[in-house]
Image (cartoon, helix red, strand yellow):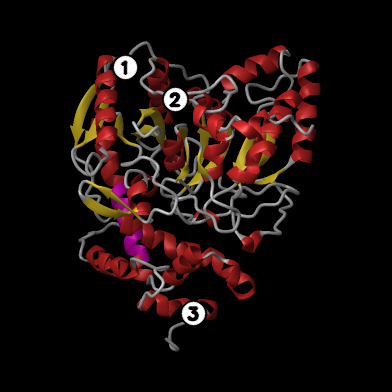
Amino acid sequence: MDQFPSYEELRGEIEELVAPRYGVISGFQEILEEIKVLQEIDLKEIDPL
Amino acid sequence: MQTIKQLALLIKSGEISPVDCLQEALKKIKKTNDKSHIFITVCEERAYAEAYKAEKEISRGEYRGPLHGIPYTLKDLFNTKDVRTTGGSKVLDDNTPNEDARVVRILQQKGAVLLGKTNLHEFAYGITGENSHYGTVTNPHDGTRLAGGSSSGSAAAVVMGQGVFSLGTDTGGSIRVPSALCGIVGFKPTYGLLSCEGVIPFCWSLDHVGILTSSVYDSQQVFAALAPGRNENLSFSPSLNGLKIGIPETYFYEKLDPEIEQRLEKVKKEIESLGARLVSVEMPELKNSRTVSLVLQLPEALSYYSRYLEDKGKLFGDDVKAGLTAGQFILAEHYLRAKRMAKLYRQEMSSVFQKVDLILTPGTPCIAPKVGTKTVELGMQSEAVGNALTRFTSFFNITGSPAMTIPCGFHTKGLPISFQLIADVNNEETLIRTALTLEHFKVSDGLRVSDSGVSEHFTKKYSKELQKPSEN
């Protein structure tokens, strides 16, 4: 995490993101898994603009 | 609950003065705001200045149109000159802009009277309207339930007659969902049509400015004022002959409260009886659309709000901070893929609108949940409350399509049910004309309004406060 250019002020939240204890951050792991699904979709030549 | 249609006639004829209207609204606010939390800031001084100005102009015969002298409210994301603009956050507790947002300047030119700034989910970062800083606005029909968000105060203000209309923002349903849960009309025009200049952003790619009113007619009046030259003289049609309305084959009629499903069936029959043809349509594959929306929202929000982290980071609410934290881990490639998916959705919806004029869906899959609800049970499945409430709305922020939620009756639990109409981008004309027709033929079914101009439930809830003599 020291190598990652994250915001210092949000560091306290990262642990909660990785291993939720308070339930404040929920569903992040789910988002990461869903992003993997997005990456498998063939978007052909579609640009982002 | 008063309407622009009623009030404008009375104001124009001189039967009611804008100052009287303002005083009436301020009385209601003062009697209930301690409990309702609808307003973060009431701008009494500015309101009186605008109302007196309108009164003088109208008495001189300088009537500016249907919004002249009409009191309205703004979600507290719209910058207002010399009036505190908090975004519903302690981070901006002392923020006083030196200029009005562009849409506010237009309303001022039309002679509307700004009453105050309404409560919201902090920085529009949620759909429940729960706010730990300024209090949670509860549903005017049942104080144990959510008003919905993020434009919670705007929706409740319209129901309570504390301002005749309100402007809000909608990033995933933040105008349409609270409107649906509170039983009013919520309208999000095409992406970019109403200016976001001077509005605190949440997600530039998805934010829409829009309108909350008690009727479709009123919504059209405000829209015409904010987007001059577009659809100014629309009226209802004698029938819906020739109109093709798409009913999505999947997703939008699944996992619904049974009473909402029944009510939508009734709406469909009434629409058919007016001459429209209902056509089954295949929609784009929607199962990934929530992820696309989130992957756009999280880094865009972080990009904007990171400016406050160093000095005021501790003042963010837990849910906002959690979202900002997550935003750090969305890679550029993820974000660009989401942007490409959004373009694909827009192309696919354009094809859908080659086949139909409009699409009809429920506004929300459930009625207003209880305050504090984390998950709702629908179709024998548990779903996070935020996902459920935005299930039928957020996709149309990605596509930028104009969409309107319209009340169509009440659940046996006493809470409103709404349907949603969606049109192709820049086809507000068909959307509004159809909605006006449905309103005219009473397919839409607004609030039960008491003689005092406040919804029956709220009259009961606040009966003691409303009976107290005014302090003014």
Q: Position of residue B164 (x, y in %)?
A: 60, 29
The residue tagged 2 is: B446
Q: Amino acid at mark 3?
A: Gly
Horizontal side, residue B16 vs residue B366: left or right: right
Report the residue that reaches farthest toward the bottom: A2
* Residue plotted at (80% across, 28% down): B52
Pointers 1 and 2 in contact (CB under 8 A)?
Answer: no
Report the residue that reaches farthest toward the front: B464
Q: Position of residue B269 (x, y in %)?
A: 24, 21
- Name which quarter of the figure residue B24 lies in: top right
Magenta span of residues? B335-345
Marking on residue B124:
none
Circle count = 3
Element marked by disc 2:
loop
Marking on residue B240:
1
Instruction: Pick the residue in front: B230 or B21.
Output: B21
**Circle 1 marks a residue in which chain?**
B
Q: Position of residue B207 (x, y in %)?
A: 48, 50
Task: Indicate yes or no whether the magenta region holds residue A40.
Answer: no
